Image: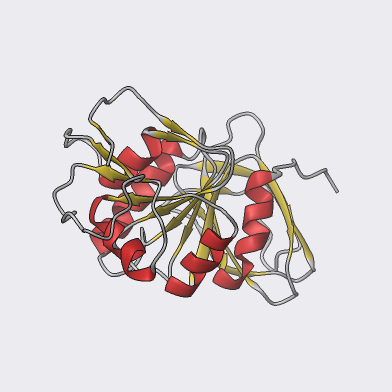
Amino acid sequence: MPQDSSISSSLTFDRPLIVLGGGFVDEALLKTLAARSYPVVAADGAAHVALAAGVPLVAIIGDMDSYDPDPDLSADTQIVEVAEQATTDFEKCLYRTSAPLYICLGMMGKRFDHSLAALHAAQKYGVEKNLILMDQTDVIAVVSGAVEFSVPVGTRVSVYPLAPTQMEYSYGLEYPLNGLTLAQGELIGTSNCANKNQVKIVQDKTAPKPFLLILPNEYLDALIEIETHHVSATSI
């Protein structure tokens, strides 16, 4: 199998990329997404999750401290060993690849420190890359600027700031975000809910910062639509 230890090269994809981590992974969902012809990359030892599910891997990326060579691995799978220890294997997957959208499974759940590290990566790369993370309950889009989406009335909608951020307005939420400054340790927007079918959330345009838009995980396709066709919400 090909091996690449060069830190400068990057794998480029023209479609959404699935990135696997060692946390909770819904195997049925993984197979469904792979059936859409989305390529799959594993962060180090998470390769064994894909192999157990019979899902082919385009690449394994990481410092290779938790991947054990497996005879079932395809010869076409690229091994990208990155020795530096300043970043997590998830970060290595992000900076060694380029894709229009990242659907990240197994970055949340099981170990809380790994979940925190995933949020660190979301803040670090959330402006330059379109990121979606999933666990067994929620789907999380890392967004900035303005977003608009449709969900049934009563759907749980959470907004969580990765950095202090000024919200311009919201529409369709039970508890409006109009004019609020959201910041961890001060004011957050979790456990809100939709009171209209159409929801809009708009940040102050002068300094948009990445924030988490969190929905129940059955709305994955809605967040894929947001991330792949990101259109600013118009003022109401």
On screen, residue 193 versus residue 92, left or right, reads right
On the image, the x and y values in percent for residue 70 come to 21, 58
Depth check: give the residue in front, 46 or 142. Answer: 46
Q: Which residue is depicted at the point 58% across and 35% down?
A: 208
On the image, the x and y values in percent for residue 127 come to 52, 35
On screen, residue 141 versus residue 79, left or right, reads right
Question: Where 220 falls versus 81 (above or below)?
Answer: below
Q: Is residue 136 visible?
A: no
Q: Which residue is depicted at the point 47% across and 65% down?
A: 30
**Residue closest to the far right:** 236
**Residue closest to the far top:** 8
Question: Where 233 falls versus 82 (above or below)?
Answer: below
Describe the colour scheme in one phrase. Answer: secondary structure
Q: Which residue is depicted at the point 27% across and 42% down?
A: 1
Image quadrant assignment for residue 76: top left
Q: How many marks?
A: 0
Depth check: give the residue in front, 215 or 106. Answer: 106
On screen, residue 20 versus residue 98, left or right, reads left
On the image, the x and y values in percent for residue 165 come to 53, 42
Q: Is residue 27 visible?
A: yes
Q: Which residue is depicted at the point 31% across and 39% down?
A: 92
On the image, the x and y values in percent for residue 44 come to 25, 50
**Residue closest to the far bottom:** 154
Question: Where 100 falls versus 48 (above or below)?
Answer: above
